[in-house]
Image (cartoon, grey):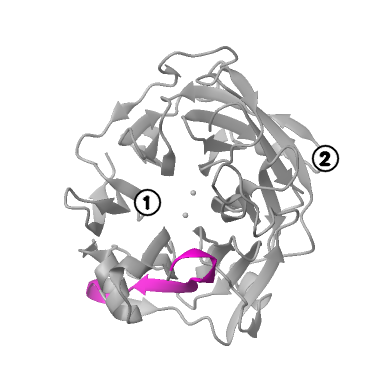
Amino acid sequence: MKLRPSLALTLAAALAASTATAADLSDSLKKGTPDIKSAGPLAFGPDGILFVGDTQGAAVFAVDTGDRSGPKDKAPLKLENVAAKVAAKLGTDPQKVLINDLAVNPASGKVYLAVSRGKGPDATPVILRVGAEGVLEEVSLENVKFAKAEIPNAPAPGAAVRGTSPRAESITDLAYVDGRLFLAGLSNEEFSSRLISIPFPFAGPADASAIEIYHGAHGRFETKSPVRTFVAYKINNEPFLLAAYTCTPLVKVPVADLKPGAHVKGTTIAELGNRNRPLDMVVYQKDGKEFLLLANSSRGVMKIPTESAGGAAGITAPVQGTKGLGYETIASLKGVTELDQLDARHAVVLVRDDSGTLNLETIDLP
């Protein structure tokens, strides 16, 4: 399943959470073949429902995987040279395979991979599941139970900004929390960085409101940099989102403030170093304390104590280096590109070794 420079986020309607049971949620899906154009960020809801972010189609899909149970004790995984094994499964060359995300189904403990077969906007989307003993299984997207929610005001497919495609960042991360699917990404609006909240079962279009943060490393407010990764977190029993942005602000956003049409200012509670891109993160407990585990492109994996997140003063002035919540770099975790929590003591990671080979592993949460 999941905070940055001065930033503007946009958030879609924070509508009331559904009180339906998991069985009701899967019953809300209709059988057919979803028109998924790309497989990007993944997140799980209840009852084995997989959410798939489709950046090319500017939509998010809920797919019933039928994967609803598993062993109480989750088996550790070890799958070496994942790209080669994925390519062999799909009958193509490893250079034509891109693994976009991974997510662990909490109902079964199985790992799911979002894959592009080919390159660019014409790549074929594929969802793979890591089965028993590391065997890859393709998740059928034909004649399945699903639902679709379109994302409003997405960047145009052919748009380009400084040589990059904002359309490819229309969805950067997903998280299902208490009956709502939260989505981060870019819009085509002036305050282009946004968060969207969609009630599930999907019920109509999402509305948006802007969120602004201060980026200490850049010394200014920014509105066009997307949230790269985020998680749900409770402070004094109130729901928040902890979000990470490029270069690398960590921000807390109260969910209660995310209302249609509102302009919300997120609080930057840490600057974790510039020239860096956050990749993925999870929140977990160990020895009676809570931590954020954040994988980065240039600064390894950070273990950040969150006990002072609630009372942390907001950063509102330029920062040289780091400031705010402190962190420990986990020296044993190098090359991590994706991670998700497997159980209370373990996480699953995609890690690139010294030879450049991508492997799937189970690790102890530090």
Furthest-bottom residue in this view: 143
Q: Residues within 10 Å of mark 1 (few under 14, many from 20)?
A: many
Circle 2/circle 1 CB separation < 8 Å? no
Please tell me which residue lies in front, 84 or 48: 84
Question: Magenta residues, as a range?
Answer: 119-134
Secondary structure at badge 1 equals strand
Horizontal side of 319 relative to 350 (left or right) equals right
Quarter assignment of residue 55: bottom right
Point 39% across, 38% down: residue: 294
Asked if residue 301 is positioned above or below residue 47 in the image, the reply reads: above
> Which x, y percent locates residue 215?
56, 23
Asked if residue 164 is positioned above or below residue 273 in the image, the reply reads: below
Inspect this view and state whether residue 102 appears.
no
| Residue that label 1 marks | 338
Asked if residue 309 is positioned above or below residue 364 in the image, the reply reads: above
Secondary structure at badge 2 equals loop
Point 61% across, 19% down: residue: 220
| Residue that label 2 marks | 261
Furthest-left residue in this view: 355
